[in-house]
């Protein structure tokens, strides 16, 4: 009788230890899956078009130059549209470059306002930049005593 009780006690203890180890493993696996799901959700909300940046890189007598930069690590497709103040499309194209770097030349005096519109094909996230150029003529007259 004593041998049977010892055997049952060992088996029960072994089962309890296995159950505890299994539960711990299950908890760790669940936590890992949950963390991966959160990471994926946060990555999806950060659309590449939101990281776009436009810089004015210079002028000459007839033109203004701008550079559009976009870091698109996933290589997802996005649309670029450039419109004037009347909504007329000046330029439109589709890209999926991972390191997008494009320069634009806008003729002075042709348009006062130009809008760059970026739209993600995946989630329709948009980012727009508006460029206003105003030209003013300043005439300066200086009277100097001699």
Image (cartoon, rainbow, N blue to C red):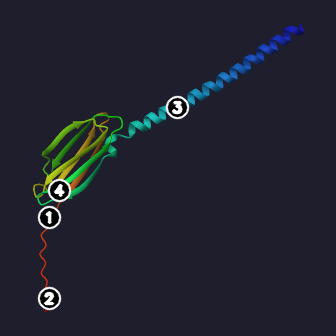
Q: x and y percent of residue 79 in the render?
A: 24, 38
Q: Separation of disc 2 and disc 4 at Cα?
A: 36 Å
Pointers 3 and 2 in contact (C-beta within 8 Å)? no
Q: x and y percent of residue 59 in the render?
A: 18, 59
For label 2, the SS is loop
Looking at the rendered image, the quarter that the N terminus falls into is top right
The residue identified by callout 1 is 135
Which of the numbered marks, if any, corresponds to residue 34?
3
Q: x and y percent of residue 121 in the render?
A: 28, 34
Q: Earlier in the sequence, mark 2 or mark 4?
A: 4
Pointers 3 and 4 in contact (C-beta within 8 Å)? no
Pointers 1 and 4 in contact (C-beta within 8 Å)? no
**Along the horizontal axis of the image, is 4 left or right of 70?**
right
Q: Residue at x 36, y 37 (%)?
A: 73
Q: Earlier in the sequence, mark 3 or mark 4?
A: 3
Task: Find residue 89 and report its image quarter.
Answer: top left
Local crowd size for mark 2, using a 10 Å CA cut-off: few (<14), some (14–19), many (≥20):
few
Q: x and y percent of residue 47 in the render?
A: 35, 40
Q: Separation of disc 2 and disc 1 at Cα?
A: 28 Å
For label 3, the SS is helix
Q: Residue at x 65, y 22 (%)?
A: 22
Which of the numbered marks, if any, corresponds to residue 144?
2
Q: Earlier in the sequence, mark 3 or mark 2?
A: 3
For label 4, the SS is strand
Of circles 2 and 1, the one toward us is 2
Local crowd size for mark 1, using a 10 Å CA cut-off: few (<14), some (14–19), many (≥20):
few
Q: Separation of disc 3 and disc 4 at Cα?
A: 50 Å
Q: Separation of disc 3 and disc 2 at Cα?
A: 78 Å
**Along the horizontal axis of the image, is 34 left or right of 94?**
right
């Amino acid at each position: 009788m004593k041998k049977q009780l010892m055997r049952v006690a060992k088996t029960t203890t072994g089962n309890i230890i296995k159950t505890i180890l299994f539960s711990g493993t299950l908890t760790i696996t669940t936590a890992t899956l949950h963390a991966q799901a959160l990471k994926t959700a946060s990555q999806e909300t950060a659309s590449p078009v939101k990281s776009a940046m436009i810089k004015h890189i210079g002028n000459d007598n007839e033109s203004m130059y701008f550079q559009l930069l976009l870091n698109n690590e996933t290589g997802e497709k996005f649309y670029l549209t450039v419109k004037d103040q009347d909504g007329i499309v000046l330029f439109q194209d589709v890209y999926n470059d991972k390191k997008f770097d494009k320069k634009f030349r806008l003729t002075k005096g042709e348009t006062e306002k130009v809008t760059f519109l970026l739209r993600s094909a995946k989630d329709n996230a948009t980012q727009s930049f508006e460029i206003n150029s105003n030209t003013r003529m300043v005439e300066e007259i200086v009277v100097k005593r001699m």
